[in-house]
Amino acid sequence: MSSQGQTIIQVHDFTAAYDGQVVLDGLNFEVYAGEVFAILGGSGSGKSTLLKHMIGLYKPKAGTILIEGDDIAAAEGEARLRILRKFGVMFQSGALFGSMTLLENVALALEEFTDLPPEAIRLIAHMKLERVGLGGVADRMPSELSGGMQKRGAIARAMALDPRLLFLDELSAGLDPATSAELDQLVLSLAQSLKITFVVVTHELPSIFTIADRVIMLDKKRQGIVAMGNPRELRDHCDDPVVRQFFSRQADLDGGA
């Protein structure tokens, strides 16, 4: 839980566009160290677009995204690599390399970015897998794992370099309620025990209310943020019709963006 102290991410006057078409316009928000921050919105609202800019896959049309004070879009070379090493990413599908074992997937970043000997790398990778409850399946291939286990493995890989910040894209997508609830508890455990800051893209209401300290809600028509705050307070007190519709599920607003 964050007490709104240190700012770990600052998004200022951010605008995103594809082929000249503006998707998000003039976003401003901060993410505080130690909190679980969720990005919400209906289909096409720009959730994944925002996430992809925050992790440096795309450059903003305008504005800045600062990670611990560093502009991820403007940085180049070693400066950019230094920023990228500050965070880990779990992509929606897990995105584990199918030709590698689970242990080899987690060890990859350690092999690429550290000078540790193979024995130490294997030990650290095992520790990361133990931390997400997968110590007993380290030598299995991703194809041998359930969807929930693949996402746990992807979280372990994202944690390989001990980042303070993790981005999770659609943590619960495609999973049954029980598995989703287990992943939610894992996120809470990691946030509390390791003081990791999470930015999570999700549209699953149970997950939102379980893990999120604060949320922003995006809207396709308005191309920006329509609400920000604690999800329960927004559900109970926000008068914006888009927000009320999302939390009451009066229509099918789910989907990627």
Image (spheres, rainbow, N blue to C red):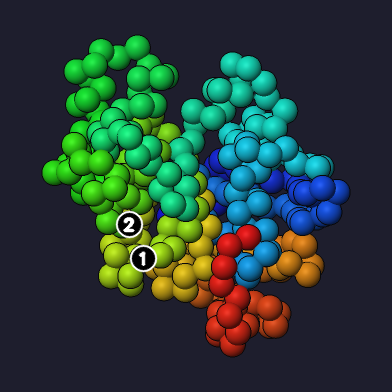
Q: Position of residue 242 (x, y in %)?
A: 68, 78
- Whether residue 246 sits left or right of residue 108 in the image: it is right
> Residue 175: which disc?
1
Q: Which sits earlier in the primary sequence, circle 1 or circle 2?
A: 2
* Viewer-closest of 195 and 177: 177
* Viewer-closest of 175 and 50: 175
Mark 1 is surrounded, within 10 Å at the Cα level, by few (under 14), some (14 to 19) or many (20 or more) other residues, namely some
In which quadrant will I find the N terminus?
bottom left
Q: Is residue 45 above or below residue 66?
A: below
Determine which quarter of the picture holds residue 53: top right
Determine which quarter of the picture holds residue 147: bottom left
Does residue 95 appear in the picture of this structure? yes
Q: Disc 1 and disc 2: Cα gap in Å?
A: 7 Å
Figure label count: 2
Mark 2 is surrounded, within 10 Å at the Cα level, by few (under 14), some (14 to 19) or many (20 or more) other residues, namely some
* Viewer-closest of 46 and 241: 46
Q: What amino acid is labelled 2 in the image?
A: Gly
Q: Position of residue 92 (x, y in %)?
A: 47, 53
Q: What amino acid is labelled 1 in the image?
A: Leu
Residue to which mark 2 is pinned: 147
> Residue 158: which disc?
none
Q: Are marks 1 and 2 in contact (CB under 8 Å)?
A: yes
Query: What kind of element bears circle 1?
Result: loop
Q: Position of residue 3 (x, y in %)?
A: 49, 53
Q: Is residue 30 above or below residue 225?
A: above
Q: Residue at x 86, y 49 (%)?
A: 20
